Amino acid sequence: MSSYRYRCEQCRTTSPPMPTRREVEVERDRHRALAHAGHIPDGEEIKGPPANEPPGTPLQRAIVTAIVITIFVIATWVRLA
């Protein structure tokens, strides 16, 4: 599952993983308000999912793979019959 984290280098803290960018932006804004009086700290960043992360959860990918293999086996069996 894709996840995002907010990192404040000034405080040397990272948020827990959050499923959407919007949720981590809310966390960023909350942190700015509480820890920095609304100011933007130097070195802060939002870390997103790795660029090469395949879509879906591992279970979803396994299900899709199983379906593709099943279709291939059925198509091969029909040709041989």
Image (cartoon, rainbow, N blue to C red):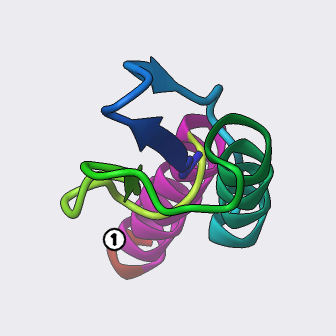
Residue at the outermost top position: 12
Q: Is residue 39 above or below residue 65?
A: below
Residue located at (48% from left, 62% from top): 40
Q: Is residue 68 magenta?
A: yes
Q: Is residue 23 above or below residue 9?
A: below
Q: Is residue 16 magenta?
A: no
User: Mark 1 highlights which residue?
Assistant: 80
Residue type highlighted by circle 1 = Leu
Snapshot quadrant of residue 80 = bottom left
Mark 1 neighbour class, 10 Å CA radius: few under 14, some 14 to 19, many 20 or more: few
Snapshot quadrant of residue 17 = top right
Q: Nearer the viewer, residue 65 or 51?
A: 51
Q: Is residue 25 left or right of residue 2?
A: right
Q: Which residues are magenta?
A: 58-78
Q: Nearer the viewer, residue 45 or 69?
A: 45
Q: Is residue 35 left or right of residue 54?
A: right
Q: Nearer the viewer, residue 65 or 34?
A: 34
SS at mark 1?
Answer: helix
Q: Nearer the viewer, residue 60 or 48?
A: 48
Residue located at (65% from left, 54% from top): 28
Residue located at (37% from left, 19% from top): 12
